Amino acid sequence: MFEELENAFTSSLEELTQAQTPADLDIWYKGSLGRKGKLNLMARRVGQLEPDKRPEFGRRVNQLKKELEKAHKDRQDQLKGIDLDSVLAADGLDVTLPGRRPVRGGLHPATMTLRQIYRIWGDMGFQIYRSRDVETDELNFELLNMPKHHPARDMWDTFHTTTPGVILRTHTSPGQIHAMREYFPEPIRVILPGMCYRYEQITARSEIQFSQVEGLAVGTKISMADLKGTLVNFTRRMFGLERKTRFRASYFPFTEPSAEMDVECILCSGTGCQVCKYTGWLEILGCGMVHPRVLKNGGYDPAKYSGFAFGLGPERIAMLKYSIDDIRYFWSNDLRFLKQF
Ligand SMILES: [Zn+2]
């Protein structure tokens, strides 16, 4: 009996090594460990033994069953491994191949320039102030010292909406009024970035939509010298320490006096080229002392307060910095252009 039991165990173990598929394993399990399997059939015959041998026999049966269970589990794992190997071989998957690089987007050149502008003004204590793209005629023109039929309105070709008096802002300057009314009577140091819209012929030099960054400083004893010093500092950081600048008298309805600021041509360093039209200078921004009437409209008493303002075009600056010759590239979403940055 004991010998028969050992033989049954050994033959079961041998059969197990021949099982090749999960189905083979199931058949083997039934035949060896199932209710009517070899081991259980042996166990049932325990009555044929002398009573004193029975416990030992029972213990041995359980022991061998456990060993077979373990062998079965091992074989199962082994077959799974073989299975995976054959699947991998069949599919020809090469896990050593380097992965494909995910396509990563980049920042738009206008955004890059904007962020650089933010950083420079931020370092000088200017906060970003945002206001809406859709404005009223009153804020876009009237409160900025351009009453209806004022000839200066011709400087901005305007998009009107179907609602009378509601327009797309032609410049970021209405933000000045918003900021002043919000901050009064505190001193103000803000830049107002945003998109502006003008009904214009689209050419290499003008678009119907473009970014603008307005700047506004209001306080007591702010003079033209502060305006010049601040703007010169800005251009030095934007275009390089050695870059020369100059101011030219100009006219804007909302500043008095007004000026335009030029920076020495980046391409020819002032010797004259096509981009600067052989003048050696590039115009980069308009500026001036906030007009007393505008201060008053913002809530500040012009007898007590003064301020300066400026407006610059990030796309224009990006064009100068990266030698881009056509402003239409910015918003036409041509990847061949955008991928270069
Ligand atoms: Zn030049």
Image (cartoon, rainbow, N blue to C red):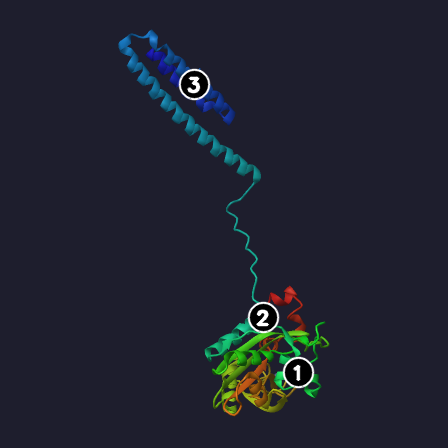
The answer to whether the residues at label 1 and label 3 have Cβ atoms under 8 Å apart is no
Judging by the rendered image, the residue that carries numbered circle 2 is 109
Q: Which mark is residue 81?
A: none
Q: Residue at x 70, y 87 (%)?
A: 151
Q: Is residue 162 above or below residue 252?
A: above
Earlier in the chain: of badge 1 and badge 3, it is 3
Q: Quote the CA–CA distance across marks 1 and 2.
A: 23 Å
Closer to the eye: label 1 or 2: 2
Judging by the rendered image, the residue that carries numbered circle 1 is 274
Whether residue 111 can be seen here: yes
For the residue labelled by badge 1, is the local secondary structure a helix, a strand or a loop?
A: loop
Q: Residues within 10 Å of mark 2 (few under 14, many from 20)?
A: many
Q: Residue at x 57, y 39 (%)?
A: 91
Q: Residue at x 55, y 55 (%)?
A: 102
Q: Residues within 10 Å of mark 1 (few under 14, many from 20)?
A: few
- Quarter placement of the C terminus: bottom right
Percent position of residue 25, x then y: 48, 24
Q: Is residue 9 above or below residue 318?
A: above
Q: Mark 2: which amino acid?
A: Pro
Q: Residue at x 45, y 29 (%)?
A: 76
